[in-house]
Amino acid sequence: TAEDRADRALVQRAFKHLTGRSGEPVQYALMDDTPVGVLGLAAVPAGLLRLEFIGGEEPFVQRLLALFPDQPVERSWALDKVRRELERYFAGRRFTFDTRVDLSGLTPFQRKVLGETVKVPAGRYTTYSRLAAKAGRPRAARAAGNALHDNPAAIIVPCHRVLRGDATLGGYAGGLPAKSWLLRHEGVQL
């Protein structure tokens, strides 16, 4: 709306005045009604920058300010598309996403690992070692795990579908109860 554009221009002018920098605003929103806890979403027109499990709005905003120091951060409802996709996911109506994720801040290996992770279908899982092999580094299971740890878009890039070689959960930024819930929700029986 015109009011949103005016607010955005005001934020950009204030940010430039205070910092001398004028980056594109990072827009964020919260989803506090999910079965796996509060999610923080952040995006720019190029794509989703972050989808994280968070403890609250203030720490999430502080993290965004640290990650994107050249850009103003503003709360927005412009993330409706990804919110609707996540609502369909949690309702069990759809387990794939059309949301574009901006992976530009990651290394080529991290992007390969996350690209292979997206290919793991709902209801299935892979292991860190198989994922590393598909990303071109068969002996780099630990590095693949580290790439998943740096996943900027949990759930959409479904790192919860990656397990240890013995089919145990391993780690997860949202916590093991969330990882377990997501896998059961998708039909994985462990």
Image: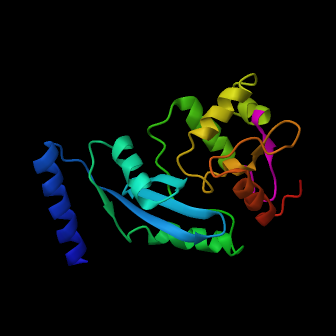
The residue shown at (83%, 63%) is 187
Give yes or no for residue 126 being in the magenta stretch.
Answer: yes
Q: Which residue lies furthest to the top in this view?
A: 139
The majority secondary structure of the magenta stretch comes to loop
Residue 26 seen from this side: yes
Please, is residue 152 above or below residue 95 in the view?
A: above
**Which region of the structure is painted magenta?**
120-128
Q: Which residue lies furthest to the left in this view?
A: 17
Please, is residue 54 above or below residue 89 in the view?
A: above
The residue shown at (24%, 73%) is 4
The residue shown at (63%, 56%) is 155
Please provide percent x and percent y for residue 169.
79, 45
Between 62 and 9, which is closer to the camera in this rendering? Answer: 62
Between 79 and 134, which is closer to the camera in this rendering? Answer: 79
Residue 152 is left or right of residue 155, and the answer is left
Please provide percent x and percent y for residue 24.
26, 52
Q: So how many labels did they put on this image?
A: 0
Residue 7 is left or right of residue 166, and the answer is left
Q: In which quarter of the image is residue 80?
A: bottom left
Please provide percent x and percent y for residue 44.
36, 55
Give yes or no for residue 137 being in the magenta stretch.
Answer: no
Please provide percent x and percent y for residue 141.
73, 28
Quarter of the N terminus within the rendering: bottom left
Residue 98 seen from this side: no
